[in-house]
Image: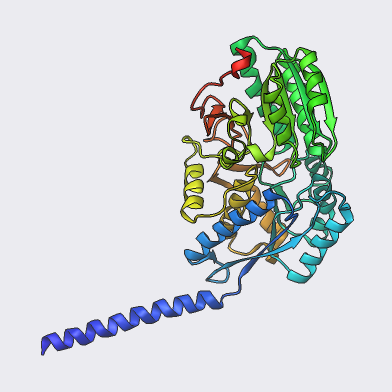
């Protein structure tokens, strides 16, 4: 008799638990999603991989029940909507990108934007749209310092914009510090730069020039190459005749691999530091093989191109990517920033207790106070610039990591705090 009573009690409890689980999942399924808008150029591999990273973050968050919105007393799922700005395609005018962003905001009514237009020129023009719609934007691609200048000229107008990734000044400065290790180790002091003729690439070359000259280096040549250049041998001949010991190449056009192939076949007597997309992912070796040996690369935020042991979140990020059997990244440079952007918004929503679109002016204050660990280290924003802070210590801020290709692997070589090996010279330089 007692057993039957207990069976009934346990049966009722079991059904109650099942009912609660069903009710919980039903409420989650019915909860209005928090909509994230991704307006960018899907012609670019960087944006395609960034979208995958965003979807991975959204899946992780939704699998955990979504984001708790305290003011509503519910957990809400995330939903992604996209718009192709086409600004990464040759010949696309800036106003076309603006129209795509405007249309997305008006029709999809996202609660926040992430990533944003690919090309710096388009992102600069988009700043006024962000201000017009008071649209919280966690921007993670465009690198031009001009965005900080725009923000600082009128912080109250542009307070909804945050750059949650590197900028070209950070990139150029870190590249310079990486290169300067060669001066200290091998007494090198002359460098040559080849830059794609775009705002962000020229800014990177300028930042590198200023920093290296301050360290005792001399720029012996600078060549700006148009987008679409597919023969670098004339420029490389100038490099050979310049006496440079280090060649820095920066850009994002798909024909840039020709440059390092010709560098190797012509045995240009320099070390090569490449600041462009297709060689910054572990997938690159399967495409280019030994042509990459001894090439130095910098996929912008630390841990985005390949995991770094000293950055636990980067190991976790790449492990999750592999476990889901997601496609390899053709361009990983700010992919981890897109992933982190979703978590930045999650963190801010949970601290604020409301979604960005409810009170964007107030919500911006919570984004300003972000302090969390991400793929590239500690994520914080400079209140005076709304720029994610980068330095050399991942416990204090985010970091940029330089790697060197060796026998099929990207090995972290800079900064010393996270390096897993020292830089080595190309064989014909020894």
Query: Is residue 389 at all visible to an observer of this figure?
Result: no
Horizontally, is 107 left or right of 388 in the view?
Answer: right
- Answer yes or no: is residue 80 visible: yes
Classify residue 218 by image quadrant.
Answer: top right
- Is residue 93 or residue 398 the one in the foreground? 93
Number of marks in the rendered image: 0
- In percent of the image, x 54 and y 54: which residue is there? 326
Where is residue 240 drawn, in percent x and y? 76, 16
Q: Would residue 65 be found to the left or right of residue 86 on screen?
A: left
Q: Farthest residue toward the top?
A: 187
Residue most extreme to the left = 1
Q: Position of residue 73 (x, y in %)?
A: 53, 71
x and y, in percent, of residue 430 in the image = 60, 12
> Going by the image, does 265 lie left or right of 430?
right
Q: Is residue 112 left or right of residue 284?
A: right
Q: Residue, x 17% and y 88% (percent of image)?
A: 5
**Residue visible at 71% across and 12% down in the picture:** 189
Query: In the rendered image, which quarter contains the N terminus?
Result: bottom left
Question: Where 408 falls versus 361 (above or below)?
Answer: above
Residue 89, position in %: x, y? 81, 51
């Amino acid at each position: 008799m007692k057993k039957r009573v207990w069976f009934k009690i346990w049966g009722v409890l079991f059904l109650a638990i099942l009912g609660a689980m069903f009710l919980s999942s039903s409420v989650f399924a019915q909860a209005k999603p928090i909509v994230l808008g991704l307006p960018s150029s899907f012609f670019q591999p960087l944006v395609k991989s960034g979208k995958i990273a965003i979807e991975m973050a959204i899946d992780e968050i939704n699998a955990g029940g979504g984001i708790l919105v305290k003011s509503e007393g519910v957990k809400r799922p995330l939903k992604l909507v996209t718009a192709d700005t086409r600004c990464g395609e040759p010949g696309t005018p800036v106003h076309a990108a603006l129209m795509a962003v405007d249309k997305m905001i008006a029709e999809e009514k996202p609660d926040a934007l992430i990533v944003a237009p690919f090309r710096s020129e388009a992102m600069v023009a988009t700043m006024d749209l962000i201000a017009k719609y008071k649209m919280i934007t966690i921007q993670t691609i465009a690198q031009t310092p001009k965005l900080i200048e725009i923000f600082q000229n009128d912080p109250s107008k542009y307070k909804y914009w945050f750059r949650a990734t590197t900028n070209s000044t950070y990139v150029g400065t870190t590249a310079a510090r990486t290169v300067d290790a060669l001066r200290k180790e091998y007494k090198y002091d002359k460098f040559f730069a080849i830059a794609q003729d775009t705002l962000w690439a020229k800014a990177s070359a300028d930042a590198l020039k200023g920093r290296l000259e301050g360290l005792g280096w001399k720029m012996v040549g600078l060549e700006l190459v148009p987008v679409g250049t597919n023969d670098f041998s004339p420029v490389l001949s100038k490099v050979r005749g310049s006496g440079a010991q280090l060649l820095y190449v920066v850009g994002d056009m798909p024909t840039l691999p020709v440059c390092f192939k010709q560098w190797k076949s012509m045995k240009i007597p320099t070390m090569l530091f490449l600041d462009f997309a297709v060689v910054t992912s572990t997938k690159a070796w399967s495409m280019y093989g030994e042509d990459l040996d001894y090439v130095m690369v910098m996929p912008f935020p630390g841990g985005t191109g390949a995991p770094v042991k000293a950055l636990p979140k980067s190991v976790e990020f790449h492990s999750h990517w592999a476990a889901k059997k997601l496609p390899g990244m053709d361009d990983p440079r700010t992919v981890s920033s897109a992933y982190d952007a979703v978590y930045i918004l999650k963190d801010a929503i949970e601290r604020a207790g409301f979604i960005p679109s409810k009170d964007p002016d107030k919500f911006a204050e919570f984004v300003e106070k972000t302090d969390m660990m991400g793929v590239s280290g500690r994520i914080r924003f400079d209140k005076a610039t709304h720029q994610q802070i980068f330095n050399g210590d991942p416990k204090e801020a985010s970091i940029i990591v330089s790697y060197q290709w060796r026998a099929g692997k990207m090995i972290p070589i800079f900064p010393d705090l996270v390096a897993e090996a020292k830089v080595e010279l190309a064989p014909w330089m020894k």
